[in-house]
Amino acid sequence: MRERGFMSIGRRDFLKAAGAASVALIGGGALAACSPNSSKGTSASKDSEIKWDVESDVLVVGTGFAGLAAAIEAKEAGCDVVVIDKMSSYGGNSTINGGDMAAVGTPLQKEAGVEDSFELMQKDMLVTGKYYNHVDKVKTLVENSAAAVEWCTGLGVEFTKLNFHGGHSVPRTNTTSNAMGADIVKAEVARLEELGVKLTMSTKLIRLIEDDSGRIIGAECRKGYKIGNEDSGSAYFVKAKKGVVLAAGGFSNDVAMRQIHEPRLTDALTSTNHEGATGEALREALKHEAMDVHMDWIQLGPWTSPDESGFGYCPQFCERLVGCGIMVDPETGKRFVKETGDRKVRADKMLELNHTTLVIGDAPTCEKRVVERIMKGGAEAGVITSYQTLEELAAAFDMPKDAFLAEVERWNGFVAAGKDEDFGALIQEGATGIKEPPFYVSKLWPKVHHTMGGLVTNMKSQVLNQDSEPIPGLYAAGEITGGTHGAVRLGSCAITDCVVFGRIAGQEIAKESA
Amino acid sequence: MRERGFMSIGRRDFLKAAGAASVALIGGGALAACSPNSSKGTSASKDSEIKWDVESDVLVVGTGFAGLAAAIEAKEAGCDVVVIDKMSSYGGNSTINGGDMAAVGTPLQKEAGVEDSFELMQKDMLVTGKYYNHVDKVKTLVENSAAAVEWCTGLGVEFTKLNFHGGHSVPRTNTTSNAMGADIVKAEVARLEELGVKLTMSTKLIRLIEDDSGRIIGAECRKGYKIGNEDSGSAYFVKAKKGVVLAAGGFSNDVAMRQIHEPRLTDALTSTNHEGATGEALREALKHEAMDVHMDWIQLGPWTSPDESGFGYCPQFCERLVGCGIMVDPETGKRFVKETGDRKVRADKMLELNHTTLVIGDAPTCEKRVVERIMKGGAEAGVITSYQTLEELAAAFDMPKDAFLAEVERWNGFVAAGKDEDFGALIQEGATGIKEPPFYVSKLWPKVHHTMGGLVTNMKSQVLNQDSEPIPGLYAAGEITGGTHGAVRLGSCAITDCVVFGRIAGQEIAKESA
């Protein structure tokens, strides 16, 4: 039976669903509110008679790569720092990704003899970003990328593999020893502990507080917050004399919010993100006249499986197979897209087909390219299945057998010739094709992955208002910001973005007079 | 000599230019401010001790299709109405377009025997809009489109021609007798005069004023304002007991603002818009917690000529030739794009080529399809040039002669066969190809034309805040709003949008208790 993924409706239904959701949404009213933030706070944002529960120099909102980097830098520069996170465990999305940092001129890259340049990485980001990127942000990221990797190394992170991600002109992705973002997050948290900064978890930002001049001087929070219950916890006021750094991540899991900007992203699509990836902190900044940009560029991951929730095992299986294994439409048994193309091209094609597709690799290919932890975990989770023959594989997914077998032969011919005549995929060096069993398969169905848009910030990570002026006392870094990645984020540039601009936020906010 | 249009720089320089502009922009500070609005107003937006210069029920900002429609409806519903516009003459962009209104089921369409439906027009808008459209807005527009045309007819507007615009499945574009938006604007202004509403021109919105509950109760303006001099005029406070309707148009001419959202739109690109098409009213609403959407979808018109400023004659020459005449790249003498494709596809291709291209039609084709006023005016202005032979034409534009002649032959073959093998352009019914002199030519270079994005409004034209709730007392209609057109506006749907939602704004605001 053809599984239609989570989209068990056709394109026309897609529209109906989007329309219905839209009506509920735009019709207005509390019913349509975005991710719940019903606790509107105790009073207006400007409040000169607040009784502060804690007074500090800097308040950092969020414990992902960016927030932790900002906190470390601010603390090392001599600030008192309070770090809050609405979740009960730290790290957010930063913990659950593949630990890949793109950078120019790192030790790994030099050892591999790769020739690279700032201009080349900048070009790659701009081409993928469709030239929507704020060029000075790209430049700053690229020029500080190696330093960011080095900074992580200084915290104890080991980068052990250089990978070649789609969209990059050369291999420049530095992957951590466990191929997990958690490697970096843990090292950052350890450093903060050394510095004497505790994380105040289960504490949610409710509203920013301004003084009479419009400067951000602190926040009302909710301490003891439990996600899912907006009335949980109790009011907790944090004074931040130098200001607030918003590093609360993106809004991929904020179904109502993402549908405003891109209606097709209904709840028929799940997300790779952790539960807390919702946009209330972003919206709170916008309520204080911050400017947003590129909010409708929401990246789908085309390498996820409907057989598991969240990010899961599949991405790190699928992405190691692009350009050596193939992706097929089970309805035709044939390839349907350039596997090494950018995420948007691939995800859009999958949504267009509107049913799950398959990624397939043979035994030698998987053994050589896919991390063992992924093969094992994926198999145990039932996400990666295996077949002794291609015929068996075809039968298992109800594929037209002859067409599929012919397609595999065709692909193997392309691999031998070093050229993909059908889709122009980049054949990986050393690729051998699909020949030796067992044959490994994952189903693919896109998930919402990353929100490129967000707050506009300058080179000091200061949040800009509608007149392009910094809002005094307000900084931001990481996925909550927008502009750096343009329309489509180039893979493995996110962690670099977080570390570079998170560090800058911490360094710059420290310079504020309290 | 190959004219490189206004982009006398290559792609790489494009990036430099964008980067430089970006640095100046994002670097922050007053230097980078968007369209000048340096007069920040006399005090904070909430002010309970204002001495009002005039007290009214409704303040309408803008005298284009939408603002005038809102004013008429509000007045007819019994409201006192003040209408302001920062320019010295009314109409803004509404006066200078082609007077084309897309609608389902109008008299013109029925007379022509065209079969159409709400679903079909909705589908056309969604397909062109890449499904970013807020579907309920599309539905409301489509279902009210014929009524909007009828309403204009009731004001005295004559729609005399049914046109078939690119991207529509069937002919449904109702064009005014003079093929000018001014036909509609003048009729609206005449109606307002009958109703006793004078337009308060040269009066610019500076800031919206809220009461203590956050309701919009009026505005501080600058009366006697002269565009280009932000210190001109004097403070003028308008109380609006029921609220304010923002119908101030788009921001195509706001170079700084458009570059934030799409950096490639530097000042190397001019605009079809009137001088006042800048975004300060939009930004002012955002300062009051309004939500914006799709700000980075900025439409270029691919049918403009670098030989004239603004909209000019060329669009109404060029668009009548799609699918019967051709567009060529003078460097190759060959076609380069699907002439009947959507605006974005065409404009992006032109920007990619980065030099002017040509649109060409022969005498019988132009005589049959292009309005005489346009042929004459275009010739007098030097925008439409003519040649007795194709060889002469090729020489005039420095084109490879043989390649060009062969391409014309090839095109004529496609026309005869009824199928464009190269680009899939829709061959127009009755097209005869390019055969009989004189041969008419315009140069093409894209201009910034329409900003799809803007304020999010509901079906009552109420402006929504960051929590998707209506901001009390604040309405908006027309190009200042976003969501209806999605990523790419389908041609001739703008006037319909303005009239439908402008009327709704006026009707709904009238229901507010003062």
Image: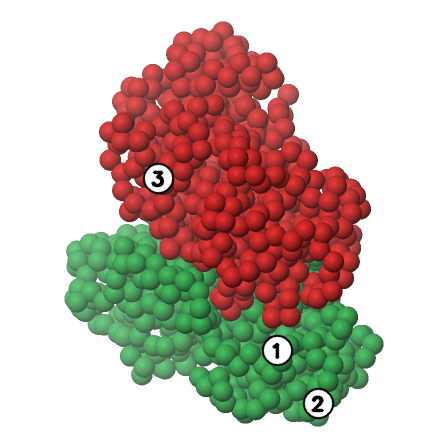
Chain colours: A green, B red
Which kind of residue does numbered mark 1 sit on? Arg
Chain label for disc 2: A
For the C terminus of chain B, the quadrant is bottom right
Residue at horizontal 25%, vertical 62%?
Answer: A9
Give the Cα distance between marks 2 and 3. Answer: 59 Å
Give the residue at mark 3. B146
Q: Which mark is residue A51?
A: 2
Which kind of residue does numbered mark 2 sit on? Lys
Chain label for disc 1: A
Identify the image quadrant of residue A462: bottom right
Whether residue A300 is visible to the viewer of this picture, yes or no, is no
Residue at horizontal 40%, vertical 53%?
Answer: B137
Give the Cα distance between marks 2 and 1. Answer: 15 Å
User: In the image shown, does B70 or B269 lie closer to the viewer?
Assistant: B70
Residue at horizontal 66%, vertical 87%?
Answer: A237
Q: Where is residue B319 in the image (x, y as percent from the top left)?
A: 45, 27
Give the Cα distance between marks 3 and 1. Answer: 46 Å
Q: Which mark is residue A207?
A: 1
Q: Is residue A275 left or right of residue B3?
A: left
Point out the frontmost of discs 3 and 1. Answer: 3
For the N terminus of chain B, the quadrant is top right
What is the crowding at mark 1: few (fewer than 14 residues within 10 Å), some, or many (at least 20)? many
Q: In this view, does B273 lie to the left or right of B494?
A: right
Dots 2 and 3 on the same chain: no
Q: Where is residue A479 in the image (x, y as percent from the top left)?
A: 57, 69
Q: Where is residue A63 in the image (x, y as percent from the top left)?
A: 59, 81
Which kind of residue does numbered mark 3 sit on? Ala
Asked if marks 2 and 3 touch (Cβ < 8 Å), the reply is no
Dots 3 and 1 on the same chain: no
Secondary structure state at the residue bearing disc 3: helix
